[in-house]
Amino acid sequence: MSAGLIAPPWRRRLPATRHVLPLVLIVVAGVLVVGPLARILLVTLTPSGLGAWADVLASRLSRNLWWLPLANTLILGLGVSAGCLLLGGFTAWLVVLTDAPGRRILGLLHTLPFMIPSFAAALAWGTLFRNARLGGSAGYFEANGLAVPDWLAWGIVPVLIVLVAHYYSLAFTIIAAALSSVGADLVEAAQMTGARRPRILFGIILPVVTPALVSAASLTLAGAVANFAAPALLGLPVRMQTLSTRIFGMIEIGQVERGFVLALLLIGVSGIFLFLSDRLVSGRRAFVTVTGKGGRTRRFPLGRWRWPLLAVGLALGILTTVMPVLVLAASSLAPQAGALFSNWTTHFWLGEGGGQMAQGQAGILRNPVLIEALWNTLKLGVVVALIAMVLGLALAHTITRRKGTVLANVLSQLAFLPLLVPSIAFAAAYIALFGRPIGPLPSLYGSFALLVIAAAAHNLPYAVQAGRSVLGQIAGDLEESARLAGAGALRRMWAIVIPLAIRGLLAGAILVFVKMVRDLSLVVLLSTVATPVLSMVAYRYASEGFTQFANAITVLILVICLAASLVAQMLQARVQRWKR
């Protein structure tokens, strides 16, 4: 045992404080997660809040405030879930269970769409399919003589297509992982008994991967229900409201009680679907597919369909990954949407402003507001990643090392509670708690501190999961030996846990950074003129018709996310030097 880990005799005689840290963490997690939700509930139980409940649920306004947004939200949620299962299931089957050529390229293509912000895909769709219904410049197709119907340019259909294109890669990842566990012995045994391919598919493969299908359906549904960007960009211009856009509208115009009521209802809708999916999985019979025998995957020969199906898979990946990025990049250089690939100019990036183009506005890299937004975004991502990973490591360490205790169970429930709360509802809860002074503490609304606190709390589940994954690889005997030598909890964490887990923690922190940089649903209510961030500025530009600026900012966000993701993959691919 290193001498640096041996505590002096006076420290060894101090009373045990094993329960102090877990209790402190419970208080911190309670304030960050439960406090805002409790506050939003209390606000809606005041006389004005009860009036807001009546307005939303039982008045002449309830059709527009609640029922129509609810119907649109459910249509989007169920439609996106079904579409993601179809596309994700097909691509996962093609990559994992067939002999299609180029499976690695297909797998990479179909994991990328979820890394692209949903508002990027929505902006790309508008750049191509926008028509002249609302005035302003038409999109690429209509500007080149192809009439685009209203139902394809605006409303629920394009929102549905954009969200399916964004979330199907999540379903692909989950289903592909489940399909890879289907052993070849199961399939070969069925083939030896004369079972045909449809029988094998519906009798063996589907029952085995049903939990993955339910999980993919519930996660994509929850994501679609909570999504703000796509409905706001493609639905709000024609007054198509979802619960997330209605929450934003109510709070934006000062009707905060109605917004808080809608936020609670949105939490309830998301919670019901997640509860039903959990009951569906927990109530079914389990099938063991991973045994002590060596496992391999049985690939079905496609025969003459190999190349056609490969073409379909490549086309889907290119349309959902490559095409949006190309459209956004071309649009950020094109003076007109109808001429995406000619007469390019760098004005929207580097223009000095003051001329005829873009109403005299300077390019994004010369605009002081954009420079401030870029700095705020990077600073927000770094600070949130650091805070979330430090707090997540402390929570994960307590949960892992005290597994099975009441304290660990309480901490685990608190840490993962934000997963049940849609981003925009979580932001509304933080406005309810910190939007006014609390005792000697001033109001934090509009401050950078509120953005940091809310974002760190909302990303806590991802940080805790990252911490648990790396701590699971570190033997508890190392810490126990240091504890017996008298090293305190902080000393053990600094000298043993962090050095062993640093690369995994850094990879997790970078993933939190990426999520924060491209997030819009959380910051749309919390970001103000005093605290601009890139995603919010891009949304404002798009709402005001400056699509080239919005697309240029989105390309900048994509570059930042891609660079950070590459760094994360490099860190995850490497191992500690002492393992070489």
Image (cartoon, rainbow, N blue to C red):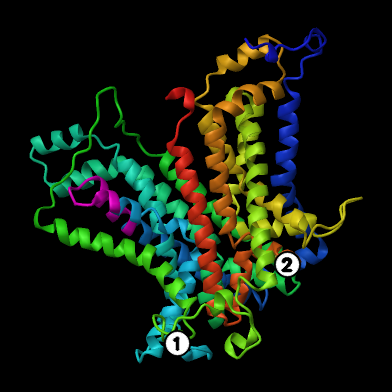
Residue 390 in percent (x, y) is at 66, 37
Magenta stretch containing residue 97, yes or no?
A: yes
Q: Is residue 505 above or below residue 136?
A: above
Q: Quadrant of the C terminus?
A: top left
C-alpha span from label 2 to label 1: 31 Å
Q: Quadrant of the N terminus?
A: top right
Which amino acid is tagged 1?
Answer: Asn
Q: In the rendered structure, which segment of residues is drawn in magenta? A: 87-105
**Closer to the camera in the image, 145 or 500:** 500
Which amino acid is tagged 2?
Answer: Thr
The residue under label 1 is 131
Q: Secondary structure at mark 2?
A: loop
Q: Which mark is residue 96?
A: none
Tell whether 134 sits left or right of 288.
right
- How many numbered discs? 2
Main SS, magenta region, reads: helix
Is label 2 in contact with label 1 (beta carbons under 8 Å)?
A: no
Q: Which mark is residue 528?
A: 2
Q: Residue furthest right?
A: 440
**Closer to the camera in the image, 211 or 56:** 211
Tell whether 19 sits left or right of 539.
right
Residue 488 in percent (x, y) is at 72, 18
Tell whether 576 sits left or right of 287.
right
Residue 89 in percent (x, y) is at 31, 53
Q: Give me the residue at 40% from left, 48% from top.
A: 214
Q: Give me the residue at 70% from left, 22% from top.
A: 491
Binning the other alpha carbons within 10 Å of mark 1 as few (below 14), some (14 to 19) or many (20 upward) gives many
Tell whether 38 sits left or right of 272.
right
Residue 508 in percent (x, y) is at 54, 41
